[in-house]
Amino acid sequence: MKLGRNDNCWCGSGKKYKSCHLVMDDKLEAMKLQGFKIPTRAMIKTPEQIAGIREASRINTMVLDYITPFVKIGVSTGELDRLIYEYTKSINAVPACLGYEGYPKSVCISINDVVCHGIPDDETILEDGDIVNIDCTTMYHGYFGDSSRMFMLGNVDPMWKQLVEDTKKALDIGVEVCKQPYCTIGDIGYAINQFASEKGYSVVREIGGHGVGLEIHEEPYVSHIGKPGKDYVLAPGMTFTIEPMINLGAPDVLQDEEDGWTIFTEDGSPSAQWEYTLLMTEHGVEKLAW
Ligand code: MF3
Ligand code: CO
Ligand code: CO
């Protein structure tokens, strides 16, 4: 298992180990001795995989750009889902949510007190004052990108608008933490939860970000609540999402028992979410999908 300095690197780059992942492996080994939780090799993508994930993420960003002008008062979420399905197919990509663990639609659309995994349908019409999350995952040439954005329709309650804007800030604070390579997932969650709590919001605990790229959901789990220095170290080559769900009221959420998917706030308070796919590099994080 221990590679020689002049052996080919384990990542498949074709480079010698000493001029590829050796320095990183030594650094992680040293961190492990200090008590850090070190990622497995399966969590670290090869250069070829990274190129594929970058491309899939670019496509996913295009899908969200495409749908943006259609997100208007009066449109049904079912119609937005159909538009995304057709557009994704037209660019030779695959809407990855469709059929994933039995999920019935191409995209998740979550309105107001729906935290995430809202299922589009023709009866749900976007209304004045709604805050809406559109969460899209796209597969392209076998690789995955995943991101989501919020939309505010018409006259939104100022507190809800603030929640939407602050949730974006919370995500960007998470990204800021990742400017430091070899930070930990606990550092991210801590920073996000600190920010949200100071503003009087609560962070959803049960659902979080995740590794992404070769599958929709991979290890590690990315909690938006954490302790500094705890949980996995984020090493160069890791692709993952940050996607905080932040509630105006209490943190507790429930799952719809009938459809088995929709997550909503227990107290009925609104919830916001934004998501990026990110790549950790030797120089800090790079945004791949937004
Ligand atoms: N895009 C979601 C995420 O951010 C995954 C949705 S899976 C689905 O993790 F099946 F609900 F679509
Ligand atoms: Co997503
Ligand atoms: Co995600």
Image (cartoon, rainbow, N blue to C red):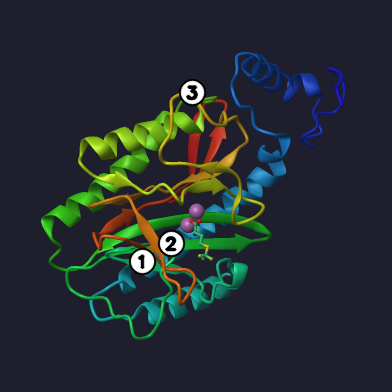
Secondary structure under badge 3?
loop
Of the residues tagged 1 and 2, which is closer to the observer?
A: 1
Q: Position of residue 18 (x, y in %)?
A: 78, 18
Judge whether residue 227 can be spotted in this image: yes
Q: Which mark is residue 71?
A: none
Q: Residue at x 39, y 32 (%)?
A: 190
Secondary structure under badge 1?
strand
The residue indicated by pointer 3 is: 229
Q: CA distance from mark 1 to mark 3?
A: 33 Å
12 horizontally vs 208: left or right: right
Label 2, ligand 2: CB separation under 8 Å: yes
Of the residues tagged 2 and 3, which is closer to the observer?
A: 3
Looking at the image, residue 11 lies above or below residue 153: above
Q: CA distance from mark 1 to mark 2?
A: 8 Å
Could you tell me if the residues under marks 1 and 2 are in contact, i.e. CB atoms within 8 Å?
yes
Q: Residue at x 13, y 60 (%)?
A: 157
Q: Residues within 10 Å of mark 2 (few under 14, many from 20)?
A: many
Q: Position of residue 28 (x, y in %)?
A: 65, 21
Work out whether mark 2 precedes mark 3 in sequence or the reverse, and give the earlier one. Answer: 2
| Nearest to the observer: residue 233 or residue 22 | 233
Q: Which mark is residue 135?
A: 2
Looking at the image, residue 44 lies above or below residue 83: above
49 horizontally vs 134: left or right: right
Q: Quadrant of the N terminus?
A: top right
Residue 90, quarter of the rendered image = bottom right
Q: Amino acid at mark 1?
A: Ser
Q: Amino acid at mark 2?
A: Asp
Q: Amino acid at mark 3?
A: Gly
Q: CA distance from mark 2 to mark 3?
A: 29 Å
Work out whether mark 1 precedes mark 2 in sequence or the reverse, and give the earlier one. Answer: 1
In the orientation shown, which residue stands out farthest toward the bottom?
123
Q: Which mark is residue 110?
A: 1
